[in-house]
Image (tube, helix red, strand yellow):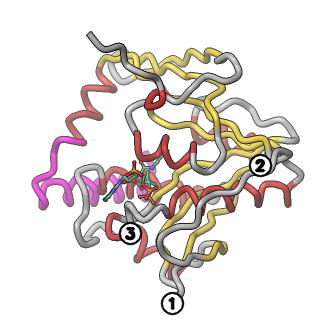
Amino acid sequence: MNLARFKTLFKALLTSLRTGQYKALLKEFRRRFYSDWTHFGLARDLTQSFEATPAKIPITIRPLKDTDVPGLLAMDAPGISDRGPYVRMHRLNFLNAQIGQCYVAATEDDTPCYMQWLMSAKDNEAIQHYFHGIFPTLQPNEALLEYAFTPETFQGKGIMPYAMAQIAEKAAECGANRVITFVDHQNIPALKGCKRSGFSPYLTRTDQWRFFRRRYVFTPLPPGTPYPFDVATPTA
Ligand SMILES: CC(C)(COP(=O)(O)OP(=O)(O)OC[C@H]1O[C@@H](n2cnc3c(N)ncnc32)[C@H](O)[C@@H]1OP(=O)(O)O)[C@@H](O)C(=O)NCCC(=O)NCCS
């Protein structure tokens, strides 16, 4: 682990201790100790037209500026959630890796309220090196969206679906017409955001964690596979 990563881990741990929010860290520890954990691979075909519902506040999409980072990723953010320090730590680490392009959604007064990275096939080597094989190698017509984040004070305003839909469309500028992303099966807000930005399930990835090491199993899903929250649960 390099020094920058160690520093963000230390800050995240300190924030969790300061705010008394240990549950997310404990959950991560248990997951990595022993579990089979599923993520959905989701894809959007940019050749099919899709119109996302506008967010509840006006937003515009632009590339991330250095000055946006404290507002988006400060560990002392107001109302920081249980997962907040952990989520911010990953994005700070990824920012240092300088892979792909990070876009933000900004409010009318240019306050950043959402971030997400767009990567293309030219980033394949860096992606495989950084993520150790958790994403498929991108084809020349494919792009990858990752690390969506809406700070707590802006959550629940429909920002993710509208922003993600527009950031996905930026992939056309690097020659892609298909965009993929991966989401933890339990992360319902993120899965809903993906559905509302035009993405559909096409794959699962099961992370088989055994004593802090993992193997991945990718399983294609049949076309038309519904999101888990759209599957009717049988009544007794
Ligand atoms: C996932 C995430 C980006 C969603 O962003 P968002 O801009 O809040 O998205 P939305 O406003 O569309 O909300 C999505 C759903 O979560 C609910 N929700 C999430 N947080 C909420 C909050 N703090 N207040 C109210 N509703 C909230 C919304 O109500 C909505 O569900 P509904 O339409 O059925 O009511 C955001 O929750 C986040 O940053 N989470 C932590 C990081 C993360 O998990 N990233 C995804 C990695 S793939």
Magenta stretch encompasses residue 122: no
The structure residue drawn at horizontal position 67% and vertical position 24%, both measured from the top left corner, is 224
- Cα gap from disc 3 to disc 1, whole angstroms: 14 Å
The residue furthest bottom is 109
Kind of residue indicated by mark 3: Phe
The residue furthest front is 236
Kind of residue indicated by mark 2: Ser
Residue 96 location, quadrant: bottom right
Q: Which residue is mark 2?
A: 120
Q: Main secondary structure of the magenta part?
A: helix
In percent of width and height, residue 126 lies at 69, 45
Q: Secondary structure at mark 3?
A: helix
Q: Which residue is mark 3?
A: 154
- Cα gap from disc 3 to disc 2, whole angstroms: 28 Å
In the image, the segment drawn in magenta is 1-24
In percent of width and height, residue 197 lies at 62, 51
The structure residue drawn at horizontal position 49% and vertical position 40%, both measured from the top left corner, is 191
Which of the two discs, 3 and 1, labels the residue nearer the N terminus? 1
Q: Which residue is mark 1?
A: 109
Kind of residue indicated by mark 1: Asp
The structure residue drawn at horizontal position 43% and vertical position 70%, both measured from the top left corner, is 72
Q: Which quadrant, please, contains the C terminus? A: top left
Q: Secondary structure at mark 1?
A: loop
